[in-house]
Image (cartoon, helix red, strand yellow):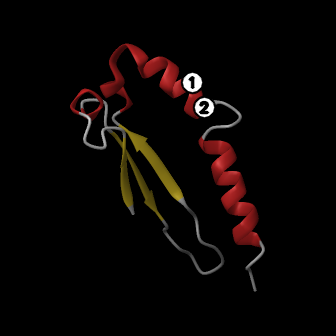
Amino acid sequence: MASTAGGHGNTTLARHRSSVQCSTPTSAKSTRVVMEHRNLDRYGAAAASTRASIDSPDGWGAIMDSFARVAGEYTE
């Protein structure tokens, strides 16, 4: 799965488009979700604050924790 963030038809924001790639390599006992958020440098002067937001307690870590919690409810 891959997705882009930013832009959405706005030519000013389109320069700042980042991408998120998720993969799910599997093993016999579990499924691991690997997520990489790329191209944050395209945010220029706002790159550091964008990264800080993503790394904050409400950022990707919280989203992935929620995903793991819900996924855990559906294990056999």
SS at mark 1?
helix
Q: Quadrant of the N terminus?
A: bottom left
47 with respect to 42 (left or right): right
Say which mark, if any, is on residue 52. 1
In the image, taking residue 15 as reference, residue 56 lies left or right, namely right
Is residue 14 shown left or right of residue 49?
A: left
Q: Residue 55 carries which label?
A: 2
- The residue lying toward the viewer, choosing from 75 and 18, is 18
Q: Is residue 20 left or right of residue 63?
A: left
Quadrant assignment for the C terminus: bottom right
- The residue type indicated by label 2 comes to Asp
Tell me: residue 56, above or below residue 60: above
Answer few, some or many: residues within 10 Å of disc 1's Cα (few below 14, many 20 plus, some between 14 and 19): few
Question: Could you say which quadrant of the image residue 47 lies in?
Answer: top left
Disc assigned to residue 9? none
* Residue 72 placement (x, y as % from top left): 75, 71
Q: Which residue lies furthest to the bottom in this view?
A: 76
Q: CA separation, marks 1 and 2?
A: 5 Å
Could you tell me the amino acid type at mark 1?
Ala
- Viewer-proximal residue, 72 or 10? 10
Please state the horizontal and vertical placement of residue 62, each as a whole percent of the image.
69, 45
Residue 20 percent location from the top left of the image:
41, 48
The residue depicted at 43 percent of the width and 42 percent of the height is 37
CB under 8 Å between discs 1 and 2: yes
Question: How many residues crowd around disc 2 within 10 Å: few (fewer than 14), some, or many (20 or more)?
Answer: few
34 w.r.t. 12: above or below: below
Secondary structure found at label 2: helix
Farthest residue in the front direction? 10
Query: Total number of numbered labels?
Result: 2
Q: Position of residue 51 (x, y in %)?
A: 51, 27
